[in-house]
Amino acid sequence: MKVREIMSRPIITEDEDASVTEVVKDMAELGIGSVVITSEGKPTGIITERDIALKVLLKNKRADEVKANEIMSSPLVTIEPEASIDEASALAAKKRIKRLPVVENGVLIGIVSVRNILTLKPEYVKRFYPEVRLLASGWTLDRLERVLSESEVCLAGNHLLSYKQRLKEVYDELGELVSYYVDDEELKDIFESLEQLCQEVKGKGEAEEEISVEEQRRKLNTILRKFRHTTYLRKQQAISSFAGDLWLGSYRYRKGKEPRLPFKRTRPW
């Protein structure tokens, strides 16, 4: 897949002579985390929330007195739209940046972020965050839990062939996930439990005397409880992480503390 297919557009820009106040207004009104800075229409730099926090707020400067070209990150690291996602990921990781403006024939046409990349290629997360323990998504687990729940309905209705088919479907996909998410102990535990259940019904016919329905339901319910617990927690964590990404949220709020700014301002904007 190419960068062109995942980049965000339209791209928001400001002239290098614009004040930081104007840049902040763009970010606040549009809910974005960066603005590309141009000089005579050509991209020359980028300003992110981090730039504003470190170069303006923490230095107690007036935002309306600071120009964009004074705090922008430059030279601008860009990528072409026909580059692959793997190339974009490698470049962003090497340069330790989270956003790559996309330029075609000298014209700015979009921007690709680490979030864009990881949405489609979560396996690249360790390139950017090597200390992170990579876990399967709660949304992926939710989908598989639904299929496994359907298998319980099949079992209760003595549709044993459908039951085994759904078990195998979930088992096969969990096997692929476990081979990738090697740090995910909860996922591995669910997989091993389901593997044992699949082995018990493998090769058996549809006759009720060959498969103990009540015993299967008991074991399946044990697996489903683990599945649902893990799924729920992962989805909640994903929602919490997204909320924590809101602009300056990590500066102003800390769990168990009163809302605060990272420092005391002595002058108005």
Image (tube, rainbow, N blue to C red):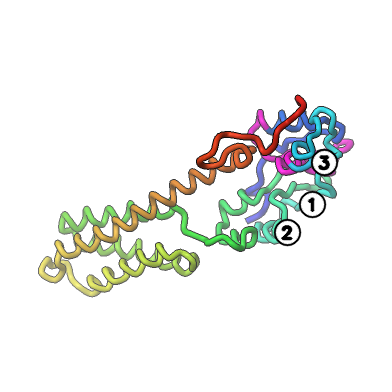
The quarter of the picture where the N terminus appears is bottom right
Is residue 174 at all visible to an observer of this figure?
Answer: yes
In the picture of the structure, the residue carrying the numbered disc 2 is 91
Residue 133 x, y percent position in the rendering: 53, 62
Q: Nearer the viewer, mark 1 or mark 3?
A: 3
Q: Do residues under tags 1 and 3 come within 8 Å of each other at their CB atoms?
A: no
Residue 258: in magenta span: no
| Mark 1 residue element | loop
Q: Residue at x 86, y 39 (%)?
A: 70
Q: Which residues are magenta?
A: 28-53
Residue 31 x, y percent position in the rendering: 63, 34
Q: Is 56 left, or right, of 181 in this rendering?
A: right
Q: Nearer the viewer, mark 3 or mark 2?
A: 3
In the image, what residue type sits under mark 1? Answer: Val
In the image, what residue type sits under mark 3? Answer: Ile
The image shows a total of numbered marks equal to: 3
Is residue 109 at all visible to an observer of this figure?
Answer: no
Q: In 3D space, how far apart are the residues under numbered discs 1 and 3 (Cα atoms)? A: 16 Å
Q: Do residues under tags 2 and 1 come within 8 Å of each other at their CB atoms?
A: yes
Residue 81 x, y percent position in the rendering: 72, 51
| Mark 2 residue element | helix
- In this view, 50 is above or below 64: below
Q: Do residues under tags 3 and 2 come within 8 Å of each other at their CB atoms?
A: no
